[in-house]
Amino acid sequence: MREIWHLVKRVAPSTTALHRTRAAMAELQERWRTPDDLGVVSKELLKDTFRALLAEHLEAKGAALEALVEAAMEGLLPWAFDWHLTVLKERT
């Protein structure tokens, strides 16, 4: 998880971008749940959408983008965002 946080720290252009990305990802996961709550409608569609969101909001590319996408699919990326925002808040 620490590697993911360091990656977020390196690629995130701003705290606003992190907040927007996290909110968009949470909304997608909520809206795309199946009625029986067994998961998202299509994992591949979710993965592609995460990829697009991360590329757009965080301007991530290449291997960094793919690592962030995998972290999002594993549910680790929101944790890394929250951790990074907490660290930034404590520094101010």
Image (tube, rainbow, N blue to C red):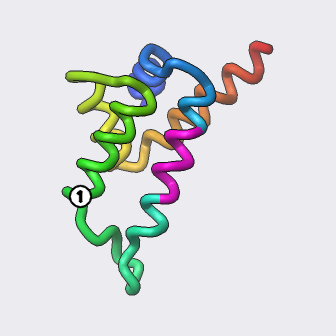
Left or right for 36, reference 83: left
Residue plotted at (43% across, 61% down): 29
Left or right for 83, reference 31: right
Tell me the quadrant of the picture where the C terminus can be found. top right
Foreground residue among 87 and 18: 18
Residue 39 placed where, x, y %? 34, 71
Q: Tag 1's secondary structure?
A: helix
Residue plotted at (67% across, 22% down): 87
In the displayed structure, would residue 79 be above or below residue 61?
below
Give the residue at mark 1: 45
In the displayed structure, would residue 48 be above or below residue 18?
below
Residue 10 placed where, x, y %? 44, 14
Asked which quadrant contains residue 59, the reply is top left
- Tell me the magenta residue range: 20-27
Residue extending farthest right: 92
Foreground residue among 69 and 74: 69
Tell me the quadrant of the picture where the N terminus can be found. top left
Residue plotted at (64% across, 28% down): 85
Asked which quadrant contains residue 14, the reply is top right
Foreground residue among 49 and 64: 49
The type of residue carrying mark 1 is Leu
Name the dominant secondary structure of the magenta segment.
Answer: helix
